[in-house]
Amino acid sequence: MDLDTQFILDTLEKIDTPADISVLPLLPVKDMVVFPHTVVPVLVGRNSSLKAVADAMAKYKYLLLVPQKEYTDDFETPQVKDLHRVGTLVSISQIIRLPGNLIKILVQGLEFVRITRINFKDGGFTAKYNKVEIGNINENTLKFKALMKNTLSLFENYIKLNEELPSEIMNNINQVEGPERKFYLMCSNIDTSFENKLTLLQQVEVQEMLMKLSEIITYESEILKFRMQIDSDVNEKVAQIQKKYLLREQIRILQEELGEGVDDFESTEELEILKKKIKDAKMPEQAEEKAMEIFNKLRKIPNISPDYAVESNYIDFLIQLPWNNASEDNLNLQEVKKILDEDHYDLEKPKDRILDFIAILNFTKDIKRQIICFVGPPVKLH
């Protein structure tokens, strides 16, 4: 909570919940659950929502906040069927007008309610509701004390794991009297899914409330631990890459100062393996010279550089070419035509061009003449 704790607690104590009001304006909220005994800001901009706030301020300053079943950004105007039948009775304590026909209201959650009927009239929602009483429990039993202590301990550990939450939250909760209020304050400060928060809101037995909350806190804490471990692994990997880069740069600078070639320095194991692959590929002389030229260039490039990946991929391409492998040519035109028709539908012009080339190969064994004939005009077969 980013508001002064004592101010919130004092204000909540002074609020009397409506006893005789059976119908109140309803404000649909997207991807948000407001818990009783909490103070939260709500941004309002839709016409129906602005009307609900205006109607509430004109009469009792009480409002029903009901979550939408759908809460995507393009879901602008909800229908009655799109609203949950549970929500929170709130009191509006402050309104701040913002540019663009927007307002921000500060609401104080009072009670959990079930909606019995929703109406849409004159551009705004109203609803009938029933307050939900939270079941009583004997706070002096050892079982309850152990459950409360365990839940508070889990939440305190969650705060330590979540860097976005201030440590003062725990002090705020310890100042609150009653397990119900402690429960709702913890719920409002957990970064969990909308569905989980809606489930927490609907708990009506204190023991079940704390059990469900403990379950969700444990789950979210495990997620935070995994995220911290992943961040640690990534930072360690980045540090190693940066260290290698700095060392390579130092080697390069020393090399330039001494006027010595790259071969005066020991190659890495990865580059030595790549060099062996170039030799084993048995490329033609020109291809091998080009591969070694790129290889020597590669040794000067840090492996985190984008150029390193480009040059390395090109060498891999040269290595994988079948320089010394050849298959036996099938120059039977009828067989070739049959295979082309079976494997390739349509494409008549490319297939005719292939058959032209094979027909020429049947007439000459000279490779130069073959190439000249192939790039010349097509020969029509009859």
Image (cartoon, rainbow, N blue to C red):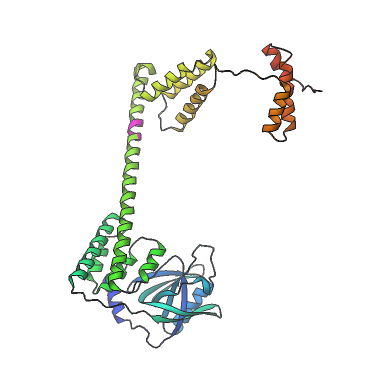
Residue displayed at 45% across by 21% down: 295
Q: Position of residue 9 (x, y in %)?
A: 28, 75
The part of the image, by quadrant, that contains residue 270 is top left
Residue 273 visible within the image: yes
- Vertical placement of residue 228 versus 7, above or below: above
Outermost residue to the top:
366
What is the magenta segment's predominant secondary structure?
A: helix
Residue toward you, 225 or 93: 225
Quadrant in which the C terminus is drawn: top right
- Vertical placement of residue 224 versus 234, above or below: below
Residue 159 included in the magenta stretch of the image? no
The part of the image, by quadrant, that contains residue 369 is top right
Residue displayed at 44% across by 24% down: 298
Q: Position of residue 57 (x, y in %)?
A: 44, 81
Q: Report the span colored magenta.
A: 241-245
Q: Position of residue 263 (x, y in %)?
A: 38, 16
Residue displayed at 46% across by 19% down: 278
Residue toward you, 52 or 345: 345
Quadrant in which the N terminus is drawn: bottom left
Residue 4 visible within the image: no
- Vertical placement of residue 285 versus 274, above or below: above
Outermost residue to the bottom:
20
